[in-house]
């Protein structure tokens, strides 16, 4: 009778909710990326044993789905009165900072992990494309726009410290390319005029933002020039 039961209570905690778990998972995603934390990490942050998490979520995929949904729901929809290209430019400007803050989310979205929070964006996006004159090629146009947006953000996140051993190290890349630059004035110009400035932390955010803006403008202008005429052919 003198020995107390030291077994850990793995039942529900009254204070622990799905929402609390989700927001804690968002914190971990912000700190280390969506794929870098485990159920054990999440439980440790919450101060519970891992089995308690499963009283609220079936598995890790269910948690990441809720995280993606919550993050996506914070994206502000642009003014629907905007002309179609301006609307997508505004959407891209709203999407980029959100997904850069939470590395790994765009990777999931590109593999089809769509959440209900994306439906409002999808609906208005298609409405803008229809108004612009897209019909037969509307699905191609939408895919090109969204894939370009997500790929560009994902590429930027490759240089995030959260990538750890998978991080795209521009400094290392420059070092590897420099011997080849001896044989190529073009490559030397690329290194000096673009890669070295981009590798400088003082320039990286500005240059990456400018690249993103330009690539979105080019894609939208290209759709207008190359695809819309096919609709009327």
Image: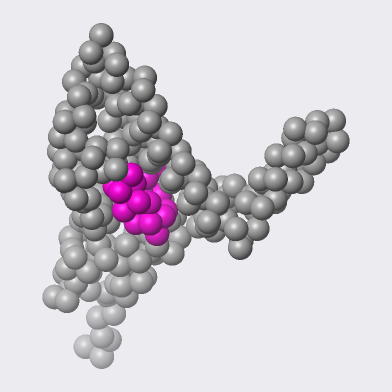
Q: Quadrant of residue 118?
A: top left
Colour mode of the rendering: one colour
Q: Residue at x 61, y 63 (%)?
A: 202
Q: Quadrant of the C terminus?
A: top left
Q: Nearer the viewer, residue 132 or 88?
A: 132
Residue extent of the magenta highlight: 89-108
Residue 43 percent coordinates (x, y): 32, 67
Residue 55 colored in magenta in the image = no
In the image as oriented, which residue stretches furthest toward the top? 233
Residue 199 percent coordinates (x, y): 65, 53
Q: Is residue 132 above or below residue 89?
A: above
Q: Nearer the viewer, residue 5 or 204?
A: 204
Q: Residue at x 39, y 27 (%)?
A: 222
Q: Is residue 34 visible?
A: no
Chief secondary structure of the magenta portion: helix
Q: Quadrant of residue 17?
A: bottom left
Q: Is residue 93 above or below residue 214?
A: below
Residue 67 percent coordinates (x, y): 27, 56
Q: Is residue 172 left or right of residue 202?
A: right
Q: Residue at x 16, y 45 (%)?
A: 81
Q: Quadrant of the N terminus?
A: bottom left
Q: Residue at x 33, y 44 (%)?
A: 89
Q: Is residue 103 visible?
A: yes
In the image as oriented, which residue stretches furthest toward the bottom? 2
Q: Nearer the viewer, residue 138 or 31?
A: 138
């Amino acid at each position: 009778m003198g020995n107390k039961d030291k077994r850990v209570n793995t039942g529900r905690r009254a204070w622990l909710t799905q929402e609390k778990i989700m927001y804690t998972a968002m914190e971990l995603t912000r700190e280390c990326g969506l794929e870098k934390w485990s159920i054990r990490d999440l439980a440790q942050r919450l101060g519970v044993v891992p089995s308690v998490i499963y009283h609220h979520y079936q598995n890790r995929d269910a948690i990441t789905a809720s995280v993606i949904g919550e993050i996506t729901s914070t994206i502000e929809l642009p003014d629907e009165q905007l002309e179609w290209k301006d609307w997508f430019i505004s959407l891209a400007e709203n999407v980029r900072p959100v997904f850069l803050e939470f590395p790994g989310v765009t990777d999931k979205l590109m593999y089809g992990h769509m959440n209900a929070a994306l439906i409002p964006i999808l609906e208005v996006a298609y409405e803008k494309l229809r108004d612009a004159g897209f019909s037969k090629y509307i699905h191609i146009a939408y895919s090109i726009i969204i894939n370009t947006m997500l790929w560009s953000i994902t590429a930027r996140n490759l240089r995030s410290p959260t990538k750890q051993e998978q991080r795209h190290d521009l400094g290392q890349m420059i070092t590897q390319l420099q011997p080849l630059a001896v044989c190529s004035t073009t490559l030397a110009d690329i290194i000096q005029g673009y890669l070295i400035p981009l590798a400088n932390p003082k320039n990286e955010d500005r240059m990456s933002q400018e690249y993103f803006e330009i690539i979105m403008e080019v894609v939208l202008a290209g759709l207008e020039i190359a695809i819309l005429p096919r609709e009327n052919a």
